[in-house]
Amino acid sequence: MTKPPFAKIKNESGYVKDMANKAILSTDLVGLEAYKTRKKKATETQSKLDEINNIKQDVAEIKDLLKQLLGSKE
C-alpha cells in the first residue's frame, strides 16, 4: 500500500506535509494570489523606475551635447 502524497498537519490548518520529500506546504490559495499580485505590481513598478532612470540619463546626455555644441560656437 502506498502512502498518500500529502498528510495534514495536526493543529495547523492551511498546511500539509509532502510525504515524498517531507516539505511543509501552504494550501492558502487566497494568500498565494495576493502574493502573486504584489509581486507583479512590484515588478511593474521596478520596470517603470528603470525606464524613468534611463530617460533621465538620456536627458543628461542631451544636455551635455547641447553644452558642447553651444561651447564650440563661442
Image (cartoon, rainbow, N blue to C red):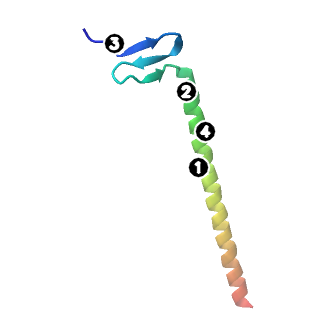
Give the x, y percent position of residue 53: 64, 58
As drawn, the label of residue 4 is: 3
Q: Residue at x 59, y 28 (%)?
A: 34
Q: Is residue 7 above or below residue 69?
A: above
Kindly report the distance in space between the C-alpha atoms of the residues bearing marks 3 and 1.
43 Å
Amino acid type at image mark 1: Ser
Amino acid type at image mark 3: Pro
Kindly report the distance in space between the C-alpha atoms of the residues bearing marks 1 and 2.
21 Å
Q: Residues within 10 Å of mark 1 (few under 14, many from 20)?
A: few
Q: Which residue is mark 2?
A: 33
Q: Secondary structure at mark 1?
A: helix
Q: Is residue 11 above or below residue 33?
A: above
Q: Residue at x 45, y 22 (%)?
A: 24
Q: Earlier in the sequence, mark 1 or mark 2?
A: 2
CB-based contact (under 8 Å), mark 1 and mark 2: no
With 35 as the anchor, is 65 left or right in this view? right
Q: Nearer the viewer, mark 3 or mark 2?
A: 3
Q: Earlier in the sequence, mark 4 or mark 2?
A: 2
Q: Which residue is mark 1?
A: 47
Q: Is residue 16 above or below residue 60?
A: above
Q: Residues within 10 Å of mark 3 (few under 14, many from 20)?
A: few
Q: Give 11 or 60, whichever is nearer the viewer.
A: 11
Q: Residue furthest right?
A: 74
Q: Nearer the viewer, mark 4 or mark 3?
A: 3
Amino acid type at image mark 2: Glu
